[in-house]
Image (tube, rainbow, N blue to C red):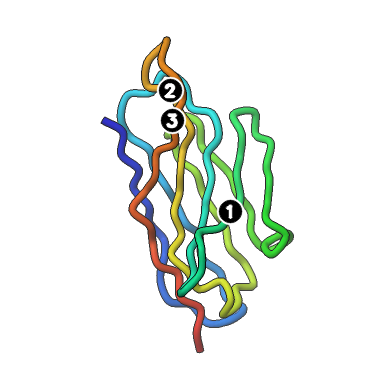
Amino acid sequence: QVQLVESGGGLVQPGGSLRLSCAASGIFFEIYDMGWYRQGPGKQRELVATIGAGGGTNYADFVKDRFFISREYSKNTVYLQMNTLQAEDTAVYFCYVDARVTRFGSSEDYWGQGTQVTVSS
């Protein structure tokens, strides 16, 4: 059974920083992409950043040069360092992994439960 546990959300003032973590547990045959999406109040879920198995990264334009994604392969963990946070970054942040749990099965996306990030003075 695959489980993703996120942590690191909270309340921060504008201009502040937070670091989100997401640890994937369970039996994996192979993990491909890991990443983060977010859903703000009254908005659709949107891509924030992804990191591939080889370390290649992809960022949404609105977070470039402010947010940085990384992963710790030995721990199946993905991180999101968020700097210079703005009120517009307020959202529930969801992590995901694209993984295969069996050798001959297809890959699937697995999602965390979400962690709230609130940017407010």
Q: Is residue 12 left or right of residue 58?
A: left
Q: Position of residue 32 (x, y in %)?
A: 54, 29
Q: Position of residue 88 (x, y in %)?
A: 58, 76
For label 2, the SS is: strand
Q: Residue furthest bottom?
A: 121
* Residue marked by disc 3: 108
Mark sitting on residue 3: none
Which residue corresponds to the image point at 42% horizontal and 47% vertical from the top-left? Answer: 22
Asked if labels 2 and 1 touch by Cβ distance under 8 angstroms, the answer is no
The one nearer the camera, 93 or 68, is 93
Q: For the residues marked 1 and 2, what is the alpha-carbon distance in whole angstroms?
A: 21 Å
Q: Amino acid at mark 2?
A: Arg
Q: In which quadrant of the rendered image does the N terminus lie? A: top left
Sequence order check, earlier mark of 3 and 1: 1
The one nearer the camera, 11 or 106, is 106
Q: Position of residue 55 (x, y in %)?
A: 65, 34
The one nearer the camera, 96 or 18, is 96
* Residue marked by disc 2: 100
For label 1, the SS is: strand
Sequence order check, earlier mark of 1 and 2: 1
Asked if labels 1 and 3 touch by Cβ distance under 8 angstroms, the answer is no
* Residue marked by disc 1: 47
Q: For the residues marked 3 and 2, what is the alpha-carbon distance in whole angstroms?
A: 6 Å
**Relative to residue 80, is residue 102 depicted above or below?**
above
Q: For the residues marked 3 and 1, what is the alpha-carbon distance in whole angstroms?
A: 17 Å
Label 3: how many residues lie within 10 Å, few (<14), some (14-19) or many (20+)? Answer: some
Which residue corresponds to the image point at 52% horizontal and 54% vertical from the top-left? Answer: 37
